[in-house]
Image (cartoon, rainbow, N blue to C red):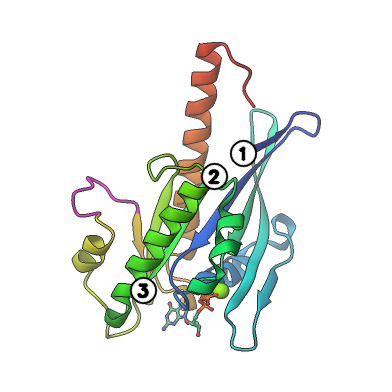
Amino acid sequence: MAQVDHEKREVTFKVVYCGPPGGGKTTNLAAIHERLNPEVRGDLVSMATSTDSTVFLDYVHVEAIVINGYDTRFQLYTVPGQPRYDATRELLLKGADGIIFVADSKIDCREENVMACQTMYRNLEANGIGRKDIPIVYQYNKRDLSNTSSLAAMDQLFMLNDTPSPQRFEASAQSYRNVVETLDAITQMILESFHAKRSKDIRLGSTPS
Ligand SMILES: Nc1nc2c(ncn2[C@@H]2O[C@H](COP(=O)(O)OP(=O)(O)OP(=O)(O)O)[C@@H](O)[C@H]2O)c(=O)[nH]1
Ligand SMILES: [Mg+2]
């Protein structure tokens, strides 16, 4: 949930990158960090093993635009994809305002994609967040490879076939393709949902938090 500091006039949103192990979450964050103007980004913090698998998190914060006199900032986290880090994922998903699900497009990763997606929903539910309560953007990564599932097959994996305009991007995080675009999409959705909630709170007469 967005953190609003009225004294400092700051709103902080949390974006969490989820997805199967080795799908490219850390690569996304590193690419964003590299692309952003140093004036608007913090340090990239990474906790990886010698095999480059995330064991706890990767983190970077981004100062964004000023809205209604409040500075907005986005905290970007990746979670470890390996199944054994379930508790860590659940912890990191606490308070998430939006999710980017980085799928591995390789044909032989279909099962891992589905499992990671199911686990993510379970981790969210453990934090009291239903799958419809939070903005999610799907990123089909590694489209530069030749052994990838078709776009329609990927949509089917995530049950996006019947969604009128699914929020999903074909990407290649390694070559920066659609990395920033994916992040832009989730930040837009988060801001829209934040404003919609505030308008509703004001209509109902409760104090916006
Ligand atoms: N070909 C190709 N390789 C990629 C792409 N994105 C990431 N990789 C490679 O995939 C491997 C795993 O990437 P990571 O970013 O560490 O994956 P992760 O999702 O953070 O993995 P965990 O932390 O274990 O959950 C690395 O060797 C990356 O270089 C891509 O777009 N194309
Ligand atoms: Mg990682």
Asked whether residue 78 is in view, the answer is no
Q: Quadrant of residue 108?
A: bottom left
Q: Main secondary structure of the magenta part?
A: loop
User: Can you see residue 102?
Assistant: yes
Q: Where residue 109 sits: x, y (%)? A: 33, 78
Q: What residue would you read off at disc 2?
A: 97
**What residue is shown with label 1?**
2
Q: Which amino acid type is shown beneath numbered disc 3? A: Glu
Q: Secondary structure at mark 1?
A: loop
Q: Residue furthest bottom?
A: 50
* Above or below: residue 159 compared with residue 2: below
Instruction: Name the residue type under label 2.
Output: Asp
Answer whether residue 65 is magenta in the image.
no
Question: Please, what secondary structure does the residue beneath circle 2 have?
Answer: loop
- What SS does tag 3 mark? helix
Number of the label disc, if any, that sits on residue 203: none
Amino acid at circle 1 = Ala
Mark 2, residues whose alpha carbon is within 10 Å: few (<14), some, or many (≥20)? many
CA gap between label 3 and label 1 equals: 31 Å
Magenta residues (range): 160-167
Name the residue located 47 percent from the left edge and 27 percent from the top edge: 196
* Left or right, 38 with reference to 24: right
Residue that mark 3 sits on: 112
In the displayed structure, 113 sits above or below 75; it is below
Q: Are marks 2 and 1 in contact (CB under 8 Å)?
A: yes
Report the Cα–Cα distance between label 2 and label 1.
Answer: 7 Å
Q: Position of residue 121 (x, y in %)?
A: 41, 53
